[in-house]
Amino acid sequence: MSQLVAKAKTLVNKMIVAARPQLYEFWKYAKVELTPPLPADFQKLKQTAESAKLASKKDMKGQLKKSGLSQVTVGEAWLNVLVTVEVITWFYMGEVIGRRHFVGYKV
């Protein structure tokens, strides 16, 4: 029994030594990325949102005219619908081929 405990201790020590560099790197990034936002961050976010709101209100009418959405003919719209249906169909065909089963997943 004591041999088993000794082997377990050496194994745990080896695992700790092997994992130490990865843990140091994880903690280095976790200290930076996982900190909660500061009040200054909220102020900056609020200013950015307000400026984006004002810019979108100004450009909305101009963008609609520039995009040509109001100039699409019925034939072009129908072609766009057919292309969209074709893309969706091929997506689902790929799903069926990937599953190798027509209905649902094999359980």
Image (cartoon, rainbow, N blue to C red):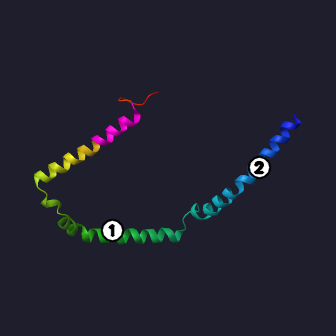
* Residue lying at 75% horizontally and 51% vertically, measured from the top left: 16
Q: Nearer the viewer, mark 2 or mark 1?
A: 2
- Label of residue 53 in the image: 1
Residue 46 screen position, x and y as percent: 43, 69
**From the viewer's perspective, is residue 59 above or below residue 79?**
below
- Label of residue 14 in the image: 2
- The residue closer to the viewer here, 18 or 61, is 18
* Residue lying at 59% horizontally and 65% vertically, measured from the top left: 32
Q: Are marks 2 and 1 in contact (CB under 8 Å)?
A: no
**Magenta span of residues:** 89-100
* Residue lying at 30% horizontally and 71% vertically, measured from the top left: 55
Mark 2 closeness class: few <14, some 14–19, many ≥20 residues within 10 Å = few
* Residue lying at 27% horizontally and 40% vertically, measured from the top left: 89
| Quadrant holding the N terminus | top right
Residue 70 screen position, x and y as percent: 14, 60
Residue extending furthest top?
A: 107
Specify which label sits upstream in the sequence, 2 or 1: 2
Secondary structure of residue under mark 2: helix
Secondary structure of residue under mark 1: helix
Left or right: where 32 falls relative to 17: left
Magenta residue check for 92: yes
Residue type pointed to by label 2: Lys
Q: Quadrant of residue 57?
A: bottom left
Residue type pointed to by label 1: Lys
**Majority secondary structure of the magenta segment?**
helix
